[in-house]
Amino acid sequence: MTFHPLAKQSPVGSALDNQVSKLTVDSRIPMVVLGGWLGAGKTTLLNRLLRAVDDSERIAVLVNDVGEVNLDVELVASRDGDTVELTNGCVCCTIGDSLAVTLRDLALGDRPPDRILVEASGIAEPDRVAAYGDRRHIRPDGIVVAVDATDVVNRAADRIYGSLVRRQAAAADLLLVTKADLTRDDGMAARSWCGDVAVGTPVVTSDRTGSDMWVGQVLGSPQPAAFPTPGTGLDSTPTVDSPAMNLPVETLSVLVDDRLDADNLAEALSLLRDRVGSGLLRAKAVLSEADGSHKAVHLAGGRVSVEPAPRSAPGILVLIAAPGSLDGVNLSEALRVTQDPEEVSVS
């Protein structure tokens, strides 16, 4: 299957086509955006993609928090603050205060990457994220959206957040169905949903035990296409509104008791999930175990899991919830934490 990014987004006029033809396309850095709802598995896909990359291409990966990317130890060459240098020549960086500025610094730096991959926030519209970047130096190379087979049908029907889930999928040039191996129908319902919401968009299933053939579709060398933004020229930096719909989300940060192990926290989160329901959108924490190892506890798509984690900033639990869904809940007691939750942001 040949992946042709932006095929659905290329109805451009001859004048703009002529501008594109005058550019030396190979001189611009292709940028892929990886989107999808909270907990859909974007970080897992990102890890697998990085492990599959060889030394022939240097990729710069931009993420919201580089600490959340649980990279294999043998893949990491060095860490320096919010940047991780990988042994295959790639680099992971935290998105700064401005994505546009971060992209500019990458493109104009001493050693520009061969390709850029941006992991969008779970509440972002990936097509808006893809509109960032100076078109003289960066060309959009496609939008890949992760679709959680265990959760997408129900989440898409949600009164508050369903419209964003549907818009994320509709913006995709490639849909990656994740966690199909965790469903009774092997992801069939999710793939059917993809076909209804994003007619004609290629759909690939990528479960945890499957092959990484999809990587070639993400990092292929597709035909360049224009990505016009209304009111801007090809040679200008587009003016982009906030890269997320105006949907309310509460983010809470909790300091976890250092005597609490991962299994106990997972049990507490399961009980909280049963009490709160779908209003608890996402949760993640990294804990230190008695044997010195680290484990990450996730709540995504209504499912709680425990996985090995790198040695980075243990003891903090982050909760993302619909406003008001945690009202009346004593989180300190429910989660056995050492302090009351701190509200980090409301967007």
Image (cartoon, grey):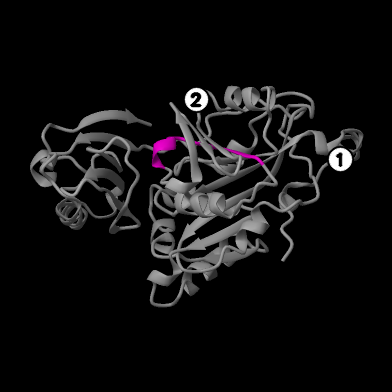
C-alpha separation, residue under disc 2 versus residue under disc 1: 35 Å
Residue 265 at x, y percent in the picture = 17, 50
User: Which quadrant of the figure has residue 211?
Assistant: bottom right
Residue corresponding to mark 1: 13
Residue 190 at x, y percent in the picture = 48, 67
Residue corresponding to mark 2: 96
Nearer to us in this view, 303 or 289: 289
Residue 221 visible, this orientation: yes
Nearer to us in this view, 190 or 212: 212
* Rendered view: 153 above or below 167: below
Q: Earlier in the sequence, mark 2 or mark 1?
A: 1
Residue lying at the far bottom in this picture: please name it.
185
Residue 173 visible, this orientation: no
Secondary structure beneath dot 1 equals: loop
Residue kind at label 2, given as amino acid type: Gly
Which residues fall within the magenta stretch?
Answer: 58-68
Query: In the shown orientation, is residue 237 left or right of residue 326?
Result: right
Which residue is rendered at x = 54% and y = 42% of the image?
125
Residue kind at label 1, given as amino acid type: Gly
Secondary structure beneath dot 2 equals: loop
Q: Of tags 2 and 1, which is closer to the observer? A: 2
Which residue is rendered at x = 80% and y = 45% of the image?
224
User: Which quadrant of the figure has residue 333?
Assistant: top left
* Rendered view: 187 above or below 12: below
